Image: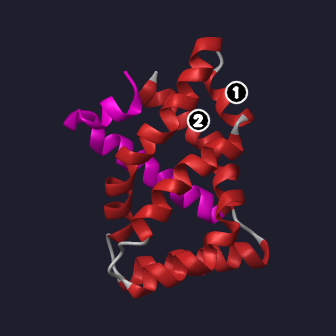
Amino acid sequence: MGLADALKDPNKKTAIIDDALKLVDAEVASKSGISGFAVKKGYDAVKSIKPGFVREAVERLLPDMAVKVEPIWDEGTKSGQPRAHLEKNRGAVADALLSVTDAKVEHAKSGLVKSTYKMLRGSAKKNVEEAVPRLGGLLEKYAG
């Protein structure tokens, strides 16, 4: 069972989303320096302006992201090393995930969300690449 299928199971969906939120929180908290400061402030701004927004965003984005990342995970499964394969292909994983957020942000209603995303988009690939090990853990837990 892949992550996209697991998300269709109401008993698993909440746990997957909760773990995905923990992943996002951990990644944001791990950022340092000037760009880390910008990521943290942008994240805090979105969370304070619209409580629950991050959870709603994860709920909306995760199914499409699962579909985009599963082919890379499946390639690794064939070799018996899906998590290592995911980490080895961080750039492709980041591009796949960011293709979903780029498409969604174009249709966002919130000007704050759009402007914050556009401000952070330049460093997004690096940040997503850094999150791949945690993502691998999530996939390992739910996608088998």
- Verify CB contact (< 8 Å) between mark 2 and mark 1: no
| Image coords of residue 33 (percent x, y) | 79, 74
User: Residue 15 colored magenta?
Assistant: yes
Q: What segment carries the magenta color?
A: 1-29
Mark 2 packing: few (<14 Cα in 10 Å), some, or many (20+)?
some
Would residue 85 appear left or right of 18 to someone viewing this image?
right
| Image coords of residue 17 (percent x, y) | 36, 48
The quadrant in which the N terminus is found is top left
Please give the name of the residue rendered at 29% of the width and 40% of the height, measured from the top-left corner.
Answer: 13
Q: Hey, which quadrant is residue 56 in on the image?
A: bottom left
Mark 1 packing: few (<14 Cα in 10 Å), some, or many (20+)?
some
Tell me if residue 71 comes above or below residue 48 in the rendering. Answer: above
Tell me if residue 139 comes above or below residue 50 in the rendering. Answer: above
Q: Main secondary structure of the magenta part?
A: helix
Please give the name of the residue rendered at 46% of the width and 55% of the height, measured from the top-left corner.
Answer: 100
What whole-number distance in Å separates the C-alpha atoms at marks 2 and 1?
Answer: 8 Å
Please give the name of the residue rendered at 40% of the width and 64% of the height, measured from the top-left corner.
Answer: 104
First in residue order: circle 2 vs circle 1: 1
Farthest-out residue, right: 33
Residue wearing tag 2 = 136
Amino acid type assigned to the residue bearing label 1 in the image: Ala
Q: Hey, which quadrant is residue 32 in on the image?
A: bottom right
Q: Nearer the viewer, residue 133 or 95?
A: 95
| Residue 84 marker | 1
Query: How many marks can you see?
Result: 2
Would residue 12 appear left or right of 75 to someone viewing this image?
left
Tell me if residue 91 comes above or below residue 87 in the rendering. Answer: below
Amino acid type assigned to the residue bearing label 2 in the image: Gly
